Image: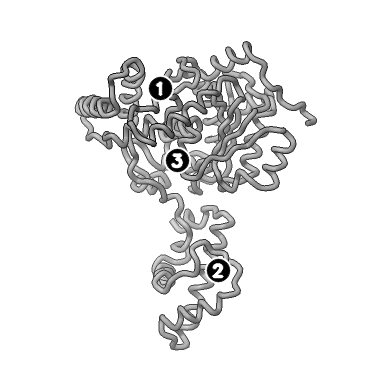
Amino acid sequence: EDLKLRSRMLSKEDQLEFGFKKRVILSARKLRQQNYTWPAVHMQLILDFINDPYARSRKDGFPSLRTIQSWDTIDRTKGTDGLRPKHARKGNRTPRFDVQFEDIVLNILEEDFLVSDRMTISTLCDRAKALYKVECKKLGVSPGPCGSKAVKAIVQRLPHANIVKLRMGSAQARKNYLLAVELQKVELPLERVEIDCTTLDLWCVYDNGVPVGRPTVCVAIDCATGIILGLQISWNAPSSSLVARTMKEVFVRKTDHFFDRFKIQNRFQAVGTPQMIVSDQGSENSGPLISSVLSSSALDWNKCIPGQPDKKPFIERFFRELSRFITQFQGASQTSDIGAQKRTGIAEAEAEYTIQQVEEMLQRWRYDRYATKNRRRVQNILRTTEAPLAAWNRLTERHLIPPAPLEHE
Protein backbone atom coordinates (compact mmCIF):
# COMPACT_ATOMS: atom_id res chain seq x y z
CA GLU A 1 0.00 0.00 0.00
CA ASP A 2 2.85 2.41 0.82
CA LEU A 3 4.47 1.57 -2.51
CA LYS A 4 1.27 2.42 -4.36
CA LEU A 5 0.96 5.75 -2.54
CA ARG A 6 4.57 6.74 -3.20
CA SER A 7 4.34 5.81 -6.85
CA ARG A 8 1.59 8.30 -7.67
CA MET A 9 2.83 11.22 -9.73
CA LEU A 10 2.37 14.76 -8.42
CA SER A 11 2.01 17.83 -10.59
CA LYS A 12 4.32 20.79 -10.01
CA GLU A 13 1.60 22.58 -8.01
CA ASP A 14 1.02 19.51 -5.84
CA GLN A 15 4.75 19.13 -5.20
CA LEU A 16 4.96 22.75 -4.01
CA GLU A 17 1.97 22.31 -1.70
CA PHE A 18 3.34 19.01 -0.35
CA GLY A 19 6.73 20.61 0.40
CA PHE A 20 5.08 23.60 2.04
CA LYS A 21 3.12 21.37 4.41
CA LYS A 22 6.30 19.54 5.46
CA ARG A 23 8.16 22.81 6.10
CA VAL A 24 5.32 24.17 8.22
CA ILE A 25 5.05 20.96 10.26
CA LEU A 26 8.80 20.77 10.95
CA SER A 27 8.93 24.44 11.97
CA ALA A 28 5.92 24.00 14.25
CA ARG A 29 7.49 20.99 15.99
CA LYS A 30 10.73 22.89 16.63
CA LEU A 31 8.77 25.73 18.23
CA ARG A 32 6.77 23.30 20.35
CA GLN A 33 10.04 21.80 21.60
CA GLN A 34 10.95 25.30 22.77
CA ASN A 35 7.78 25.35 24.93
CA TYR A 36 5.77 27.64 22.63
CA THR A 37 2.02 27.36 23.04
CA TRP A 38 0.04 26.53 19.90
CA PRO A 39 -1.29 30.10 19.47
CA ALA A 40 2.27 31.41 19.87
CA VAL A 41 3.49 28.81 17.35
CA HIS A 42 0.95 30.02 14.81
CA MET A 43 1.94 33.68 15.22
CA GLN A 44 5.64 32.83 14.92
CA LEU A 45 5.06 30.71 11.81
CA ILE A 46 3.27 33.62 10.14
CA LEU A 47 6.32 35.80 10.82
CA ASP A 48 8.79 33.11 9.71
CA PHE A 49 6.99 32.47 6.42
CA ILE A 50 6.15 36.08 5.60
CA ASN A 51 8.88 36.18 2.92
CA ASP A 52 8.41 32.61 1.69
CA PRO A 53 7.57 32.80 -2.07
CA TYR A 54 5.07 29.94 -2.02
CA ALA A 55 3.36 31.04 1.20
CA ARG A 56 2.83 34.53 -0.24
CA SER A 57 1.31 33.22 -3.50
CA ARG A 58 -0.67 30.31 -2.00
CA LYS A 59 -4.28 30.62 -3.16
CA ASP A 60 -5.72 29.56 0.23
CA GLY A 61 -3.45 31.93 2.15
CA PHE A 62 -1.47 30.91 5.20
CA PRO A 63 -3.09 27.94 7.00
CA SER A 64 -5.03 28.45 10.22
CA LEU A 65 -3.91 27.03 13.55
CA ARG A 66 -6.44 24.22 13.35
CA THR A 67 -5.23 23.28 9.85
CA ILE A 68 -1.59 23.12 11.00
CA GLN A 69 -2.58 20.93 13.95
CA SER A 70 -4.50 18.67 11.57
CA TRP A 71 -1.47 18.36 9.26
CA ASP A 72 0.72 17.48 12.25
CA THR A 73 -1.73 14.79 13.42
CA ILE A 74 -2.00 13.27 9.93
CA ASP A 75 1.78 13.19 9.54
CA ARG A 76 2.23 11.45 12.90
CA THR A 77 -0.52 8.87 12.38
CA LYS A 78 -0.40 8.17 8.63
CA GLY A 79 3.12 9.20 7.76
CA THR A 80 4.35 11.45 4.96
CA ASP A 81 2.02 9.95 2.35
CA GLY A 82 -0.98 11.09 4.38
CA LEU A 83 -0.18 14.67 3.38
CA ARG A 84 -0.14 13.95 -0.34
CA PRO A 85 -3.06 15.45 -2.31
CA LYS A 86 -5.90 13.06 -3.05
CA HIS A 87 -7.42 14.67 -6.13
CA ALA A 88 -8.62 11.28 -7.38
CA ARG A 89 -11.25 11.29 -4.62
CA LYS A 90 -12.64 14.70 -5.50
CA GLY A 91 -15.74 15.41 -7.56
CA ASN A 92 -19.50 15.41 -7.42
CA ARG A 93 -20.62 12.20 -5.70
CA THR A 94 -24.27 12.48 -6.65
CA PRO A 95 -24.87 12.29 -10.42
CA ARG A 96 -27.76 14.37 -11.71
CA PHE A 97 -29.25 11.45 -13.67
CA ASP A 98 -28.40 7.98 -14.94
CA VAL A 99 -28.26 6.53 -18.46
CA GLN A 100 -31.77 5.05 -18.40
CA PHE A 101 -33.40 8.33 -17.39
CA GLU A 102 -31.46 10.30 -20.03
CA ASP A 103 -32.55 7.89 -22.77
CA ILE A 104 -36.20 8.20 -21.71
CA VAL A 105 -36.06 12.01 -21.77
CA LEU A 106 -34.38 12.06 -25.18
CA ASN A 107 -36.99 9.65 -26.58
CA ILE A 108 -39.83 11.91 -25.40
CA LEU A 109 -38.09 14.95 -26.85
CA GLU A 110 -37.69 13.35 -30.25
CA GLU A 111 -41.09 11.69 -30.48
CA ASP A 112 -43.42 14.18 -28.78
CA PHE A 113 -41.87 17.46 -27.62
CA LEU A 114 -40.56 18.39 -31.09
CA VAL A 115 -43.88 17.85 -32.85
CA SER A 116 -46.27 19.35 -30.31
CA ASP A 117 -46.53 22.94 -29.10
CA ARG A 118 -48.90 21.91 -26.30
CA MET A 119 -46.47 19.82 -24.25
CA THR A 120 -45.08 22.02 -21.49
CA ILE A 121 -41.84 21.43 -19.64
CA SER A 122 -43.78 20.30 -16.55
CA THR A 123 -45.66 17.72 -18.65
CA LEU A 124 -42.35 16.50 -20.03
CA CYS A 125 -40.95 16.12 -16.50
CA ASP A 126 -44.00 14.23 -15.22
CA ARG A 127 -44.07 11.83 -18.16
CA ALA A 128 -40.34 11.13 -18.02
CA LYS A 129 -40.51 10.45 -14.28
CA ALA A 130 -43.43 8.04 -14.66
CA LEU A 131 -41.79 6.08 -17.51
CA TYR A 132 -38.49 5.97 -15.62
CA LYS A 133 -40.07 4.46 -12.52
CA VAL A 134 -41.79 1.82 -14.62
CA GLU A 135 -38.46 0.95 -16.28
CA CYS A 136 -36.68 0.74 -12.91
CA LYS A 137 -39.38 -1.60 -11.60
CA LYS A 138 -38.86 -3.90 -14.59
CA LEU A 139 -35.10 -3.92 -14.01
CA GLY A 140 -35.48 -4.38 -10.27
CA VAL A 141 -33.40 -1.32 -9.35
CA SER A 142 -34.07 1.74 -7.22
CA PRO A 143 -34.88 4.93 -9.17
CA GLY A 144 -32.26 7.67 -9.18
CA PRO A 145 -32.76 11.44 -9.50
CA CYS A 146 -35.65 12.03 -11.93
CA GLY A 147 -37.14 15.40 -11.03
CA SER A 148 -37.47 18.61 -13.03
CA LYS A 149 -33.86 19.64 -12.36
CA ALA A 150 -32.61 16.41 -13.91
CA VAL A 151 -34.82 16.91 -16.97
CA LYS A 152 -33.70 20.52 -17.42
CA ALA A 153 -30.06 19.48 -17.05
CA ILE A 154 -30.51 17.09 -19.99
CA VAL A 155 -32.44 19.55 -22.12
CA GLN A 156 -30.10 22.49 -21.53
CA ARG A 157 -27.20 20.49 -22.92
CA LEU A 158 -28.92 20.16 -26.30
CA PRO A 159 -27.92 22.87 -28.77
CA HIS A 160 -31.20 23.49 -30.60
CA ALA A 161 -33.53 26.47 -30.37
CA ASN A 162 -36.76 24.49 -30.68
CA ILE A 163 -35.62 22.27 -27.79
CA VAL A 164 -34.10 24.64 -25.27
CA LYS A 165 -36.75 27.35 -25.49
CA LEU A 166 -38.71 24.99 -23.19
CA ARG A 167 -41.68 27.35 -22.91
CA MET A 168 -40.41 28.25 -19.45
CA GLY A 169 -41.58 31.83 -19.71
CA SER A 170 -38.46 33.18 -17.96
CA ALA A 171 -35.31 35.10 -18.71
CA GLN A 172 -33.39 31.84 -18.45
CA ALA A 173 -35.33 30.43 -21.39
CA ARG A 174 -34.44 33.47 -23.50
CA LYS A 175 -30.75 33.10 -22.63
CA ASN A 176 -30.81 29.45 -23.65
CA TYR A 177 -32.71 30.33 -26.81
CA LEU A 178 -30.09 32.90 -27.85
CA LEU A 179 -27.34 30.36 -27.23
CA ALA A 180 -29.17 27.82 -29.38
CA VAL A 181 -29.61 30.31 -32.22
CA GLU A 182 -25.88 31.07 -32.11
CA LEU A 183 -24.95 27.38 -32.23
CA GLN A 184 -27.53 26.68 -34.95
CA LYS A 185 -25.42 28.77 -37.33
CA VAL A 186 -22.90 25.94 -37.45
CA GLU A 187 -23.54 24.12 -40.72
CA LEU A 188 -20.10 23.37 -42.16
CA PRO A 189 -17.26 21.09 -41.07
CA LEU A 190 -14.52 22.97 -39.17
CA GLU A 191 -16.74 26.03 -38.80
CA ARG A 192 -16.71 25.52 -35.02
CA VAL A 193 -14.38 23.16 -33.13
CA GLU A 194 -14.67 22.64 -29.37
CA ILE A 195 -11.64 21.48 -27.36
CA ASP A 196 -11.34 20.49 -23.71
CA CYS A 197 -9.40 18.30 -21.27
CA THR A 198 -10.70 15.88 -18.65
CA THR A 199 -9.43 13.18 -16.31
CA LEU A 200 -10.40 9.68 -17.42
CA ASP A 201 -12.56 7.64 -15.02
CA LEU A 202 -10.02 4.81 -15.17
CA TRP A 203 -7.05 3.92 -12.98
CA CYS A 204 -3.91 2.84 -14.84
CA VAL A 205 -0.77 0.98 -13.82
CA TYR A 206 2.93 1.08 -14.56
CA ASP A 207 4.46 -1.68 -16.65
CA ASN A 208 5.21 -3.50 -13.38
CA GLY A 209 1.51 -3.49 -12.41
CA VAL A 210 1.69 -0.81 -9.67
CA PRO A 211 -1.34 1.57 -9.76
CA VAL A 212 -0.22 5.11 -10.56
CA GLY A 213 -3.38 7.18 -11.13
CA ARG A 214 -5.79 8.41 -13.78
CA PRO A 215 -4.50 9.92 -17.04
CA THR A 216 -5.68 13.13 -18.69
CA VAL A 217 -7.25 13.18 -22.15
CA CYS A 218 -7.62 16.19 -24.46
CA VAL A 219 -10.15 16.05 -27.31
CA ALA A 220 -11.11 18.34 -30.21
CA ILE A 221 -14.62 17.85 -31.70
CA ASP A 222 -16.06 19.19 -34.95
CA CYS A 223 -19.46 20.62 -33.95
CA ALA A 224 -21.21 20.25 -37.31
CA THR A 225 -20.50 16.55 -37.77
CA GLY A 226 -19.41 15.29 -34.33
CA ILE A 227 -16.22 13.79 -35.77
CA ILE A 228 -13.20 13.60 -33.43
CA LEU A 229 -10.46 15.75 -34.96
CA GLY A 230 -7.87 15.26 -32.23
CA LEU A 231 -7.37 13.01 -29.19
CA GLN A 232 -4.26 12.99 -26.99
CA ILE A 233 -3.64 11.29 -23.65
CA SER A 234 -1.07 12.21 -20.98
CA TRP A 235 -0.05 11.40 -17.40
CA ASN A 236 0.29 15.10 -16.54
CA ALA A 237 -2.37 17.61 -15.60
CA PRO A 238 -3.93 19.64 -18.46
CA SER A 239 -1.23 21.80 -20.06
CA SER A 240 -0.71 24.01 -23.08
CA SER A 241 1.58 21.39 -24.61
CA LEU A 242 -1.20 18.75 -24.41
CA VAL A 243 -3.69 21.18 -26.00
CA ALA A 244 -1.16 22.12 -28.71
CA ARG A 245 -0.54 18.45 -29.56
CA THR A 246 -4.28 17.92 -29.88
CA MET A 247 -4.59 20.97 -32.13
CA LYS A 248 -1.74 19.68 -34.30
CA GLU A 249 -3.81 16.55 -34.98
CA VAL A 250 -6.47 18.74 -36.58
CA PHE A 251 -3.94 19.92 -39.19
CA VAL A 252 -1.91 16.77 -39.86
CA ARG A 253 -3.00 13.71 -41.87
CA LYS A 254 -2.64 10.33 -40.19
CA THR A 255 0.00 7.94 -41.53
CA ASP A 256 -0.31 4.21 -42.12
CA HIS A 257 1.99 3.74 -39.14
CA PHE A 258 -0.60 5.44 -36.90
CA PHE A 259 -3.42 3.15 -38.06
CA ASP A 260 -1.21 0.05 -37.84
CA ARG A 261 0.04 0.97 -34.38
CA PHE A 262 -3.48 1.10 -32.92
CA LYS A 263 -4.88 -1.73 -35.12
CA ILE A 264 -7.56 0.53 -36.61
CA GLN A 265 -9.79 -0.97 -39.32
CA ASN A 266 -11.97 2.01 -40.31
CA ARG A 267 -9.25 4.28 -41.71
CA PHE A 268 -10.18 7.80 -42.82
CA GLN A 269 -8.77 11.32 -42.77
CA ALA A 270 -10.50 14.31 -41.12
CA VAL A 271 -8.15 17.30 -41.26
CA GLY A 272 -8.31 20.97 -42.20
CA THR A 273 -8.07 24.48 -40.76
CA PRO A 274 -10.85 25.37 -38.29
CA GLN A 275 -12.51 28.76 -38.52
CA MET A 276 -13.07 29.00 -34.77
CA ILE A 277 -11.86 27.12 -31.69
CA VAL A 278 -14.01 27.19 -28.54
CA SER A 279 -12.55 26.28 -25.13
CA ASP A 280 -12.95 27.13 -21.47
CA GLN A 281 -10.89 29.60 -19.43
CA GLY A 282 -8.37 27.01 -18.20
CA SER A 283 -4.72 28.01 -17.97
CA GLU A 284 -3.85 25.23 -20.44
CA ASN A 285 -5.65 27.24 -23.14
CA SER A 286 -3.33 30.22 -22.93
CA GLY A 287 0.36 31.05 -22.83
CA PRO A 288 3.20 31.40 -25.35
CA LEU A 289 2.67 27.97 -26.93
CA ILE A 290 -1.03 28.58 -27.65
CA SER A 291 -0.23 32.07 -28.92
CA SER A 292 2.26 30.51 -31.32
CA VAL A 293 -0.42 28.08 -32.57
CA LEU A 294 -2.82 30.95 -33.19
CA SER A 295 -0.30 33.15 -34.98
CA SER A 296 0.81 30.25 -37.19
CA SER A 297 -2.67 29.03 -38.14
CA ALA A 298 -4.62 32.32 -38.39
CA LEU A 299 -7.71 30.96 -36.61
CA ASP A 300 -10.00 32.49 -33.96
CA TRP A 301 -9.95 31.13 -30.40
CA ASN A 302 -13.00 31.95 -28.24
CA LYS A 303 -13.21 31.20 -24.52
CA CYS A 304 -16.45 30.48 -22.68
CA ILE A 305 -17.65 32.17 -19.52
CA PRO A 306 -16.36 30.29 -16.43
CA GLY A 307 -18.83 27.86 -14.85
CA GLN A 308 -21.07 27.53 -17.90
CA PRO A 309 -20.36 24.21 -19.63
CA ASP A 310 -23.54 24.61 -21.71
CA LYS A 311 -21.60 27.14 -23.80
CA LYS A 312 -19.69 24.19 -25.31
CA PRO A 313 -22.34 21.43 -25.33
CA PHE A 314 -20.74 19.28 -28.05
CA ILE A 315 -17.54 18.45 -26.17
CA GLU A 316 -19.44 18.00 -22.89
CA ARG A 317 -21.82 15.55 -24.58
CA PHE A 318 -18.86 13.67 -26.03
CA PHE A 319 -17.16 13.35 -22.63
CA ARG A 320 -20.30 11.72 -21.20
CA GLU A 321 -20.25 9.18 -24.03
CA LEU A 322 -16.51 8.63 -23.52
CA SER A 323 -17.08 8.04 -19.81
CA ARG A 324 -19.73 5.40 -20.54
CA PHE A 325 -17.27 3.60 -22.79
CA ILE A 326 -14.25 3.74 -20.48
CA THR A 327 -16.06 2.76 -17.26
CA GLN A 328 -16.82 -0.72 -18.57
CA PHE A 329 -13.18 -1.75 -18.09
CA GLN A 330 -11.27 -3.01 -15.06
CA GLY A 331 -10.05 -0.09 -12.96
CA ALA A 332 -13.02 2.21 -13.61
CA SER A 333 -13.11 4.86 -10.87
CA GLN A 334 -16.92 4.99 -11.04
CA THR A 335 -19.77 3.17 -12.76
CA SER A 336 -23.50 3.64 -13.20
CA ASP A 337 -24.03 1.46 -10.11
CA ILE A 338 -21.20 2.62 -7.81
CA GLY A 339 -20.16 6.26 -7.40
CA ALA A 340 -16.64 7.65 -7.33
CA GLN A 341 -16.40 7.82 -3.55
CA LYS A 342 -16.93 4.06 -3.07
CA ARG A 343 -15.37 2.94 -6.34
CA THR A 344 -11.95 4.65 -6.09
CA GLY A 345 -10.41 2.11 -3.70
CA ILE A 346 -11.82 -0.79 -5.75
CA ALA A 347 -10.47 0.78 -8.95
CA GLU A 348 -6.94 1.00 -7.53
CA ALA A 349 -7.01 -2.65 -6.52
CA GLU A 350 -8.32 -4.00 -9.84
CA ALA A 351 -6.42 -1.65 -12.21
CA GLU A 352 -4.62 -3.61 -14.93
CA TYR A 353 -4.24 -1.37 -18.03
CA THR A 354 -1.18 0.73 -18.80
CA ILE A 355 -1.57 4.16 -20.36
CA GLN A 356 -0.36 2.73 -23.69
CA GLN A 357 -3.13 0.12 -23.64
CA VAL A 358 -5.73 2.77 -22.77
CA GLU A 359 -4.55 4.96 -25.64
CA GLU A 360 -4.87 2.03 -28.03
CA MET A 361 -8.43 1.33 -26.82
CA LEU A 362 -9.45 4.97 -27.18
CA GLN A 363 -8.00 5.44 -30.67
CA ARG A 364 -9.56 2.22 -31.93
CA TRP A 365 -12.93 3.16 -30.39
CA ARG A 366 -12.63 6.63 -31.93
CA TYR A 367 -12.32 5.32 -35.50
CA ASP A 368 -14.04 1.93 -35.50
CA ARG A 369 -17.06 2.59 -33.23
CA TYR A 370 -17.73 6.22 -32.38
CA ALA A 371 -17.28 7.50 -35.96
CA THR A 372 -19.77 4.99 -37.34
CA LYS A 373 -22.43 5.17 -34.61
CA ASN A 374 -25.63 7.00 -35.59
CA ARG A 375 -26.46 9.94 -33.33
CA ARG A 376 -29.91 11.00 -32.25
CA ARG A 377 -31.61 13.67 -34.33
CA VAL A 378 -32.12 15.75 -31.19
CA GLN A 379 -28.37 15.70 -30.44
CA ASN A 380 -27.17 16.42 -33.98
CA ILE A 381 -26.75 20.05 -35.00
CA LEU A 382 -27.69 19.03 -38.57
CA ARG A 383 -30.95 17.46 -37.34
CA THR A 384 -30.15 14.10 -38.93
CA THR A 385 -29.57 10.59 -37.62
CA GLU A 386 -26.26 10.23 -39.44
CA ALA A 387 -23.07 8.88 -37.93
CA PRO A 388 -20.26 11.46 -37.57
CA LEU A 389 -18.23 9.94 -40.42
CA ALA A 390 -21.24 9.87 -42.76
CA ALA A 391 -21.99 13.53 -42.00
CA TRP A 392 -18.33 14.46 -42.55
CA ASN A 393 -18.18 12.68 -45.91
CA ARG A 394 -21.46 14.18 -47.11
CA LEU A 395 -20.62 17.75 -46.15
CA THR A 396 -17.02 17.69 -47.36
CA GLU A 397 -18.29 16.63 -50.79
CA ARG A 398 -20.79 19.50 -50.93
CA HIS A 399 -18.70 22.29 -49.41
CA LEU A 400 -15.17 23.61 -49.74
CA ILE A 401 -13.27 22.82 -46.54
CA PRO A 402 -10.35 25.10 -45.53
CA PRO A 403 -7.33 22.92 -46.34
CA ALA A 404 -4.79 21.93 -43.73
CA PRO A 405 -1.33 23.54 -43.80
CA LEU A 406 1.38 21.82 -45.81
CA GLU A 407 3.79 19.53 -43.96
CA HIS A 408 6.61 22.07 -43.75
CA GLU A 409 4.16 24.75 -42.57
Do tag 1 and tag 3 residues touch (Cβ < 8 Å)? no
On residue 28, the disc is none
Q: Which residue is mark 2?
A: 55
Q: Which residue is mark 1?
A: 162
Q: Position of residue 255 (x, y in %)?
A: 69, 24
User: For residue 340, which quarter of the picture?
Assistant: top left
Q: Position of residue 352 (x, y in %)?
A: 47, 40
Position of residue 68 relative to residue 353, above or below, is below
Label 1 element class: helix
> Can you tell which quarter of the image residue 241 is in?
top right
Q: What is the three-letter code of the residue carrying label 1? A: Asn
Give the CA separation, mark 2 to mark 1. Answer: 52 Å
Secondary structure of residue under mark 3 = loop
Residue 36 is situated, as x and y percent measured from the top left of the image, at: 44, 86
- Rounded to the nearest angstrom, the CA distance separating label 1 from label 3 is 33 Å
Q: Residues within 10 Å of mark 3 (few under 14, many from 20)?
A: many
Q: Considering depth in this image, is 54 or 109 the residue closer to the camera? A: 109
Amino acid carrying mark 2 in the image: Ala
Query: Which element carries disc 2, helix, strand or loop?
Result: helix
Q: Which residue is mark 3?
A: 201
Q: Quadrant of the C terminus?
A: top right
Furthest residue to the right? 408
Mark 1 surroundings within 10 Å by alpha-carbon count, few (fewer than 14), some (14 through 19), many (20 or more): some
User: Horizontally, is 121 left or right of 329 in the view?
Assistant: left
Q: Residue at x 54, y 53 (%)?
A: 9
Looking at the image, is mark 2 or mark 3 earlier in the sequence? 2
